[in-house]
Image (cartoon, coloured by chain):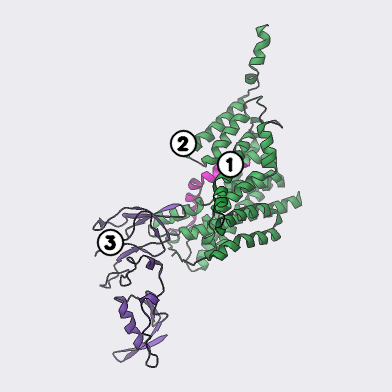
Chain colours: A green, B purple
Amino acid sequence: MDITVLMPELLKGLAGFSWGNLLMILIGGLLILLAVVKEYEPVLLLPIGFGCILANIPLTGMTSENGLFGVLYRAGISTELFPLLIFVGIGAMIDFSPLLAQPKMVLLGAAGQFGIFGTLILATLLGYPLNEAASIGIIGAIDGPTAIFVSARLAPELLAPIAVAAYSYMSLIPIIQPPIMRLLTTKKERLIRMEYSPRPVSRKALVVFPVVTTLMVGLLVPEATPLISMLMLGNLLRESGVVDQLNKAAQNEIANVATLFLGVTIGSTMSADSFLNWATIGILVLGLLAFILDTVAGLLFGKLMSALSGGSINPLIGAAGISAFPMAGRLSAKIAQEEDFQNFILMHAMGANTAGQLGSVMAGGVLLALVSGLV
Amino acid sequence: MIIKVKIDEQIYEVEINDVRVRPIKALVEGEEFEIWPEGEPTVHPILPIIGGNKKPNPSISTEDLPRTAASSHAHIAKPNVSDFTPSGNGILQVVRAPIPGVITAVNTQTGAEVTVGQQLCVLEAMKMNNLIRAPRAGRISAVHISVGQHVKHHDILVEYAD
């Protein structure tokens, strides 16, 4: 056989390879590097990075309709199965008692969602259609599964950059938030001590809470029900105390397996032709803005609560009213301790943080309801 | 309850909420005082002065006192240990747990001299390592914690000697 006939056949993989593919493989490598070296959300960035590399090898067929990623995408992302399974795990990990002991923290959890709506408005003004603007705004939920849940429904074509923005910014919270926290609060405010008030939360309340919340949210915001109900199912497994093996499975096996397939499938959508465009850059910039707006709104609301309470609330806990749990709560506590090592606002910050987790899910549901009605 | 106390011809009104909780909180002319009775049995002599028409209840004993957060560790919760030195000059005598959690490291020992801000122990709460630091310089007379121990809010962690 003539070698000149064979060569193109042997090299067709290389022939289909573009500069864009090379760039995306480098980006995938960068994500893996961040995961391995910096340990930025490694559980997610590692599979996303690997999926990204795979998606940019030409002719593998993995992303085609019946390829591995095609099947996984239809099974887990289009149907929103993976984010919901992850939520069962998150629910089992969250201890709502700091919130139940201090119900007023719910207000901070609501304020921390301002970034979603602020960014939505801005993106609309910049010319993004409403469904895309809403999907970009949801990055401000600072909650990967919620962002994927909402954007998979409203603007699936933007899913990859939105997921990447949501998860990589989440891991950058310790870098993004502290400068804003220092800028917007005075030293005097950061020095406000908050005594831990051990208001006991009964086991009954902890068990009733997930059921009542599911019913209330379900009736008020039906679109948020899939997310909130799975979150609350996980929490019920945890708080009931009678299904410890299910609780552990939700926290570990179920959450981990779902996260692995979610990550690698999201990564597989990062092909050069769908990722390397101006929309992606716009999403990355606006997503960052959404994060910043959340923090600003939370802090300003914290300052308002601080003023109204006569200076007994440390406004730093306002920055914890976002979904990134438990990172944001720990961060508030850490900044307060930098000023005064005897000030332990951790429990208050965690109350705001769990409220933020609930708030972001509610906001995601509200957004779905509003935008589905308008588009 | 309100007790009238006469000191040098002047009558003070003292309002006490509950004599069984520690510290006893007394409100004198709008100012709140926290009182730690010296040695628990001396609590009871307070009762007779409550009023002539009420008999002191002799059945109240230390066992009836509400279990404070710390009292499950009997050796810690010596009721006569005040947060401050007896001299009354407001020097902090003990370091208490600011939040509930688990001790993951103890970095001081009995007899150690510590400086302000020196790490005394690590208290893990909400999966976060909280460093407990010395509020003042001094010598440690007792360490009430060990690694792996669960502490409740306000449990005594270490005591100062001076």
Residue B145 appears left or right of A223? left
Label 1 or label 2, whichever lies nearer to me, is 1
Q: Name the chain under label 1.
A: A
Cα distance between the residues tagged 1 and 2: 23 Å
**SS at mark 3 in the image:** strand
User: Residue A1 location in percent, x, y?
Assistant: 68, 6
- Say whether residue A112 is visible: no
User: Label 3 sits on what residue type?
Assistant: Ala
Q: Residues within 10 Å of mark 1 (few under 14, many from 20)?
A: some
**SS at mark 2 in the image:** helix
- Was residue A167 drawn as part of the magenta stretch in this picture? yes
Label of residue A37 in the image: 2
CB atoms of marks 1 and 3 within 8 Å: no
Vertical order, A111 against B27 (above or below): above
- Magenta segment boundaries in residue numbering: A162-187
Residue occupying the point 54% across, 46% down: A252
Q: Name the chain under label 3.
A: B
Tell me the residue that label 1 is attached to: A257
Tell me the residue that label 3 is attached to: B142
User: Residue A256 location in percent, x, y?
Assistant: 56, 43
